[in-house]
Image (cartoon, rainbow, N blue to C red):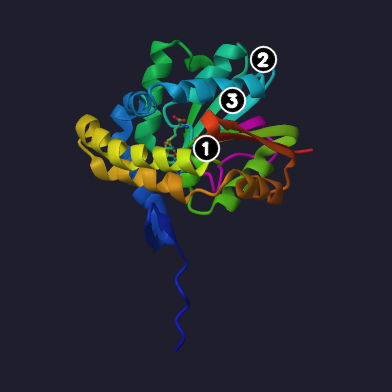
């Protein structure tokens, strides 16, 4: 007689049943995959590269490490890792095969294929053994995941004791005036740019909405702690437009 209440989540500003979100996210990244890297440079005026380099500076990759880059898309983080630590191993895992295909083309062009694997998989149920990585990273993927706590728990599981998690994600600017100005830019310019470059305004409308739905720095740091990580710290990038979060599995 009683029907169980359906669990819901957000897809940008829409409320959707939890089981539908991953399919919708997969649709977004399948549509934008071929122009994803170009759009990243245009939307951020290249600043995403500075943030990703800052991630590597803090992470300090080592040649003996095995990296798992979750929601790794076209490979930006894995490529940087391998270039800084020749001899290291990296696995890029992503829900959307088309993003990985674009990454594989880049890896071939940059001759980085040998130390790199590409795996289709979900951050919430990582297809890897417990304790099998030294480092787990994620750049701009977390806010797309349906149950973020599940993904953080999985990151903890697949890391070996002594391993490190680092997440780069859009965040909240502590200064409300700057946040207001940034919102004007995001909501008015990025979807139009998406329309012009990818002929897909809707996907970029989702992307800017998903940024606004993501928890602030301290709330997200608490979620990382809840997964079991210790020494959790974050650094704001570009006055809090994005933030880098670090935690250790002790
Ligand atoms: C904004 S892109 C980031 C790509 C890359 N990390 C970068 O920094 O350029 C987000 C990526 O997250 C992936 N993604 C979304 N939900 C996921 C999930 N549940 N598990 C694994 N990957 C997911 C998407 O397919 C997409 O490739």
Query: According to the image, label 1 marks what residue?
Result: 169
- Residue 127 image position (x, y, % from top left): 56, 42
The N terminus - image quarter: bottom left
Left or right, 157 with respect to 210, comes to right
For the residue labelled by badge 3, is the local secondary structure a helix, a strand or a loop?
helix
Residue at point 39%, 62% (across, down):
15
Q: Distance between the residues labelled 1 and 3?
A: 11 Å
- Residue 119 image position (x, y, % from top left): 48, 34
Query: Around disc 2, counting alpha carbons within 10 Å, would you say few (fewer than 14), some (14 to 19), or many (20 or more)?
Result: some
Where is residue 95, by image quadrant? top left
Query: According to the image, label 2 marks what residue?
Result: 63
Residue nearest the viewer, comparing 111 with 196: 196
Residue at point 20%, 36% (across, down):
199
Left or right, 163 with respect to 186, comes to right
Q: Are marks 2 and 3 in contact (CB under 8 Å)?
A: no
In the rendered structure, find residue 245 and report the number of the disc placed on it: none
In the rendered structure, find residue 55 and report the number of the disc placed on it: 3
Residue 92 visible in image? yes
The secondary structure that most of the magenta stretch takes on is loop
Q: Is residue 108 above or below residue 14?
A: above
């Amino acid at each position: 007689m009683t029907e169980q209440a359906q669990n819901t989540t957000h897809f940008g500003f829409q409320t959707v049943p939890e089981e539908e979100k991953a399919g919708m996210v997969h649709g977004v990244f399948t549509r934008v995959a071929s122009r994803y890297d170009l759009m990243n440079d245009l939307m951020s005026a290249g600043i995403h590269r500075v943030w990703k380099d800052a991630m590597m500076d803090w992470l300090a990759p080592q040649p003996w490490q095995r990296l798992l880059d979750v929601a790794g898309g076209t490979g930006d983080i894995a490529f940087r890792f391998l270039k800084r630590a020749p001899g290291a191993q990296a696995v890029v895992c992503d829900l959307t095969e088309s993003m990985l295909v674009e990454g594989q083309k880049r890896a071939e062009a940059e001759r980085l294929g040998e130390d790199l694997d590409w795996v289709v998989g979900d951050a919430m149920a990582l297809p890897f053994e417990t304790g099998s990585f030294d480092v787990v990273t994620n750049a701009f993927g977390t806010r797309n995941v349906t149950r973020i706590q599940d993904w953080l728990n999985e990151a903890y599981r697949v890391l070996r004791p002594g391993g490190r998690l680092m997440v780069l994600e859009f965040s909240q600017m502590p200064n409300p005036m700057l946040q207001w100005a940034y919102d004007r830019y995001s909501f008015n310019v990025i979807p139009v740019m998406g329309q012009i470059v990818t002929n897909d305004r809707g996907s970029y409308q989702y992307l800017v909405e998903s940024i606004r739905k993501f928890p602030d720095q301290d709330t997200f740091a608490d979620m990382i702690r809840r997964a079991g990580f210790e020494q959790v710290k974050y650094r704001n990038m570009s006055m809090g437009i994005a933030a880098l979060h670090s935690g250790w599995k002790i």
